[in-house]
Image (cartoon, helix red, strand yellow):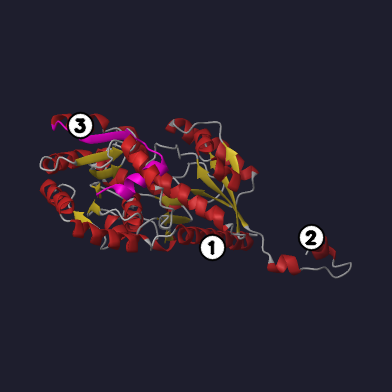
Amino acid sequence: MTPDAVGNGEGEAQDTSIEEHEPVPVRLGVNLLWLVPGEVGGSEEYTVGLLQALAEQDDPRIDVTLYVNRRFRKTYPYLLRAFESRVAPVSGSSRILRVLVETSWLAYRSRHDDIAFIHHAGGTMPALRPVPGIVTLHDLQPITHPERFGFIKRTYIRWIAPRSLRSAVAVACLTGFTAQDAIQRAGVHRDRVHIVPCGVTTDAEVPDPVVQSSVMERHGVLDRRYVLYPAITYAHKNHEMLVASFARVCGERPDTMLVLTGGIGPNEEVVQAAIDAYGLRARIVRPGRVSEADLDVLYRNAHMLAFPSLYEGFGLPALEAMSRGCPVIASRVGGLPEVTGNAAVLLDPFDTAGWVTAMADLFDHPSRCIELSRRGRLRAADFRWPDSARSLASLYVTIGRKLGDSSRELS
């Protein structure tokens, strides 16, 4: 009913069927100022995939506004077409500038746009928050393993992350492993922790064989058996151990290669030094960050994925590989056991001899690869983007209703 009808009780009876059966959608914002394409690792794939699935569902219960940087706008224009959006006057590359914009521009815009709450998808919230916030926690590695990060980053994260998580009205985690970290290490009440898992596209069209051959030829692995590892060269990605293991495996197998995709990270010089020390420049392909289409082909044709990371809140490459039938060897750490289930060979990331044995086994026993491929596809089918998007939308609606109820109680 209209305000006038409520106020004076006069006039003809009003038609209230629309208001009664079509509640106003929850209006919320998603803070993506932190998401610099190509620089934030697996959290980019997770966030973009989740938003794309959310757009495809077009849930009438929610009204989403994206707050993005200029580089995000350039890389993902289709998301800006799918949702209402605001572009901040920054590229996002400067952490200091981004934090300043979050506490000024984002604070102003969220008030101006009449946002009920903001989903801070990068793990932290700005100190100045005129509206409540939800936080996605990808991991707490800067707190659990501060030695792997520079002084400024680890100091900032160790200060801001626990405060953000405890102040959030809800914390979204990708795995139970990360959820337990939020509860035990950051002190978040378990009632405010929710699992919003990652998804993967399992029914993607298989590229034409000619296209696949072209991609593999361009990357120097046509008619070769190769191990794939897609990861930015961060210290915790453990590239050096993989290089050392591969050096022992490839000596007796001249048709084998190691493909290391992903951008350049802080540990790049160490990784390159390890490659040179073992004399493997001719056996290791370093294409850098590749397109999604090229990575899809590399997954489909790899003899195996090796994922020796020292820490993973989730481990999306393992899931992507399994969905394409690529056998997986991964570290028994973090969220990886949850993701892979019984569909991967899990090892201690420091056990070089174990990795040598596992890779040699897959190279030398095709039946073992076939079995892991079968298990991987079955496991990956449990992770669907539509399910993830529904989990997030339900969380949005639940929080919106709680905040609405609180507001009515206060008034």
Q: Which badge, 2 or 3, comes first in the chain's sequence?
A: 2
Q: Secondary structure at mark 3?
A: loop
390 relative position to 276: left or right: right
Q: Which residues are magenta?
A: 278-303
Where does residue 173 sit, x and y in percent of width and height?
A: 40, 55
Left or right of 150? Residue 366 is left
Tell whether label 3 touches label 1 (CB within 8 Å): no
The location of residue 368, given as percent across then percent down, is: 19, 59
CB under 8 Å between callouts 2 and 1?
A: no
- How far across and down, in percent of the image, does residue 177 sit? 31, 57
Answer few, some or many: residues within 10 Å of disc 2's Cα (few below 14, many 20 plus, some between 14 and 19).
Answer: few
> Label 2, on which residue?
3
Q: Disc 3 marks which amino acid? A: Ala
Q: Nearer the viewer, residue 202 or 224?
A: 224
SS of the residue at dot 2? helix
- Element under disc 1: helix
Tag shown at residue 282: 3
Quarter of the rendering occupied by the C terminus:
bottom right
Frontmost of labels 2 and 1 is 1
Q: Residues within 10 Å of mark 3 (few under 14, many from 20)?
A: few
Residue at mark 2 to residue at mark 1: CA–CA distance:
27 Å
Asked whether, in this view, residue 348 is left or right of residue 20, the answer is: left
Q: Which residue is mark 1?
A: 398
Pointer 1 or 3: first along the chain: 3
Of residues 81 and 192, the one drawn nearer to the viewer in this rendering: 81
Q: Quadrant of residue 67?
A: top right
